[in-house]
Amino acid sequence: MNTTKNLTMTGGPLLSKRAFLKGTAAAALGLSGLPLLARGAIAQAAPRKILSGCHWGVFYGKVADGRVTEFIPWEGDPSPSPQLPGVMDSIYSESRIRYPMVRRAWLEQGPGADPDGRGSGDFVRVSWDKAIELVAGEITRVRAQYGQQAVFAGSYGWKSPGKLHNCQTLLRRMLNLTGSYTNSSGDYSTGAAQVILPYVSGSIEVYEQCTTWKNLAEHCELMVFWGCNPLNSSQISWQVADHGAWPGIAMMKAAKTKVLCIDPVRTETCKELNGEWLAPRPQTDVAMMLGIAHTLYTEKLHNQDFLDRYTNGFDKFLPYLLGKTDGTPKSADWAAGICGLPAETLRDLARRFAAKRTMLALGYSTQRQHHGEQIHWMLITLAAMLGQIGLPGGGYGLSYHYASGGAPTHTTPILKAIDDASGQASDGAAWLSQSGAVSIPVSRLVETLLNPGKTMQFNGHEITLPLIKLAYWAGGNPFSHQQDRNEMLRAWRRLDTFIVQDAQWTASARHADIVLPATTSYERNDIEQVGDYALSHIVPMKKIVDPVFEARSDFDIFAAIADKLGKGYAFTQGLSEMDWIRGIYESAKIESRAKGMEMPVFDVFWESNKPLEFPLGKEQADFVRHADFRADPLLNALGTASGKFELYSAAIEKYGYDDCPPHATWMEPVERLGGPTARYPLHLAANHPQMRLHSQLCGTVNRQSYAIAGREPCWMHPEDARARGLSDGDVVRVFNDRGQILAGLKITDDICRGVIRINEGGWFDPANAREIGSLCRYGDVNNLTTGLSTSKLAQGNCGHTGVAEVERFKGSLPPVVVFSQPA
Amino acid sequence: MSRDPMDVVPEDQDLVFVAEWLAQQFLSPPDVQHVEAARSMPGQIALRRIGDRLGQPAAADALCQLLAAGSAADVTLAVERRHTALFEGIFRQRSVPPYASLWDGTGRLCGPAVDCMRAVLRDLDMHVQADCVEPPDHLAIQLAALAEAMRQRRTAAVTDLTDQMRVWTGRFAAALIRADGVGYYGNLARFLLSLLDRIADGSATVDGGRAAAAI
């Protein structure tokens, strides 16, 4: 290299180029010092293992030189989730949101500009100051122009655990302090069951403890997993997972308990326990249960004493069961014609259920269908006829598949959480709180956006659907969990503004107008309990690494918005993150003292780098659901109108809903496999995925373990594949009248004929974001499911209602782009 | 990494300047003042001289024309849009993330390349300023470190860092040229490749014939 040679520049004087660049180019190009590096080395930190917790369990983050290199399961975890590598990857995956971003059309032309362009990706990076100003200004504008209810903050989703950085509570806290908003009620998991069960058994039940696994292992003779797969969905918990289902299942295996699995899929649980697999047609569970109940009654196998003492309304249900009210006895033969199992199988089930100590374990998925309220009601009716409710090893359980229900509850204080400043008590599930100017059923936002002013029946009262112009989402992904994606796209065009606060560029973030980068919970401090049911430990959720890029904690983001709106101090109460955590812990410490325990002082707890364990009593280890009610139904009456199980509800009768009669009833769903209205030949099973939490972690390395040809897998029975000329690994187009998606075909006899399985939570990846009905390139199953509600009673979602057809994809295969992998 | 005071890198303030100027371009889009400066006669001359110095006169020409097309405000907006789409954006068909970790085969942000860069910075007795939120494997920080190593006349450091950068910048620049063609950043990608070539050539002279390319 010759850098000193003088050269002639065309048209100019003789100059030393080197001299020129050294001397004047910097000034000519406006470069005046590069603000990147500063003098002085930063010492290399020693490698550390930092304790934290997440939906997938307690773990250590291994940190070297400020960078996390591995998540190592806590040694006390009985069965660490294989999803943990994806959890770590969520910090550093390429789908991480790095900076505040605003959609260009919105920024340049104002709210409501070019709503069709949402999802097409033309974002502008803005500073945090600008982003906060825009958000605060837009909340103010919408409230002033359209009213408080026009701001929707019913933001729903699985966020991350922690008693402080609950982004959905913090969102409502900020909005309550500065005005009001439209909230949502209920959830997508158990939308139907949690509304009807208070009428039937007096509480929502679905998030309450079941008879313990230990008790089952000792007393249960026949365990029936009905749409219930603990070894999949108990990987995760709303708080920090304890994975108590694994030792529970191991106890049952050791006890050689007979297991029956009723499911369109031969599940992990079924395989582990060498269970008998029955696969009725999906969405026909109520008919199947009625057929069993009819056999119980006609063969006098039912427990009339139990029905007399512990239930109310069997006399009004019985005429329906026997066909006296509608001319159709709900016999095993009648049920067989609907559910597809032989009548003799149903009769045999009735006899076995009655002869053995039987536990009926029902999963949430069964009620995410049209008329889903009826399933849980009918199961309890069936269990009541068997008369084993409240006995060791018998009765029914509604949470065995979720968050390790059945893992025994320890003696523990309950950690309080930061509240939403609504003045309402915050105990219990935060997402069931009812603050806000108006509240709509959580799955009805699309209907609300499309029909402002319309009245809707909901659980015995009438709601006028509000006009909503701004939706603010934090810690959720409605472009995953909401059904009927294309109807949703139509509805979203009614919004002026969609704000998303998240750590990942989910499909929702891609369809937002303003995107705020939040930290993952591994970049901030928090505190949480271990096990939704077990409550076995309190775990310090310690910050593992500093926030990456420009991410800020949810607390800091909402505090900044509140401050812009003049309520900064009210929001923070002048407390820092660690002040809040210390306060939450110390409140629990006082409660624990009342229970005869002494927790260590906060600093000892925090610095211990260990979860704090709480004791397990013998009674709790042997807990039997409803045993106290059975022992004394007057003293321990249920929370129903009669204090008993209500097999007929006078309250529901009064509502007069045509889609929710006053006792458990079989009603044809809007479409089903082999049903009278089905236009497509295959049922869609939108199961919970094995390697992610709904849509969380879809944008991580975990996808490599299951994606087929880069797409979401579509399971299909070999005979169905043969009939269509399809091969394993094909990219297929799955379609119906509502939408179309690509998927990668997996041919397996672990699924029954006539059913395909495409897990919910795949990230929506439209080939043309501006076109409603565009092909989803990755495989978001909710392009295909119905947006109908379960009924006027619960207005829950029907995420398992849908039929479709499958064909080999023809033409040029579009690349998947939603995960932003480098070329 | 060697701290041998006898190591000598040919003093090449031009390349130091070009590295820092490129770092600035990749870090953030130029604001309107910078665009106006680059559109001015001295700015245009400077750009052409950079192009000549790197053996990329056509790229420099293209940059000059691009910067002169339309008002300064329009040009600023256009360049800003490209910067967002290419480096801050989220869509694979348009995004070319400027992080070594995403191109070195580890598949995620903040991979081992971050550790390597932290070691490089320590060796140079430098750190990333607190108000910069980018991880140290960002191209701009690597270029700034390279400039600093040259400024400190640290031959071994220059060689090591150039080698590290050439592991990934070849594919990065190729993707950038595919995505942006003869646009602002497509031409900067050409500058980047030439800069690293020239630095490698210079180091090779000192070190006695090290391989010229690792792309």
Image (cartoon, coloured by chain):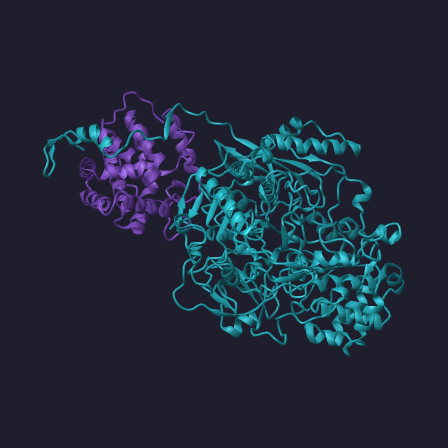
- Picture residue at 45% right of the left edge, 64% below the top: A774
Q: Is residue A336 visible?
A: yes
In the image, is residue A120 above or below residue A175?
below
Query: Looking at the picture, how far across and down is residue A354, in whole percent?
Result: 83, 64
Numbered marks: total: 0
Closest to the observer: A712 or A22? A22
The image shows residue A3, relative to residue A256, as above or below, that is above
Q: On the rendered image, what quadrant is the N terminus of chain A found in? A: top left
Left-right relation of A83 to A511: right
Residue extending farthest top: B5
Residue A438, placed above or below residue A341:
above
Q: Nearer the viewer, residue A494 or A196?
A: A494
Residue A645 occupies quadrant: bottom right
Camera-side residue of A241 and A481: A481
- Counting from the top left corner in percent of width and height, residue A803 is at 57, 69
Whether residue A232 appears in this view of the structure is no
Horizontally, residue B42 falls left or right of residue B143, namely left
Q: Quadrant of residue A226?
A: bottom right
Residue A738: image location, x then y, percent: 52, 67
Shown in cyan, the chain is: A
Choose between A403 and A238: the one closer to the eye. A238
Chain represented in purple: B
Q: Is residue A58 above or below residue A706?
A: above
Residue A783 at what x, y percent from top left? 52, 63
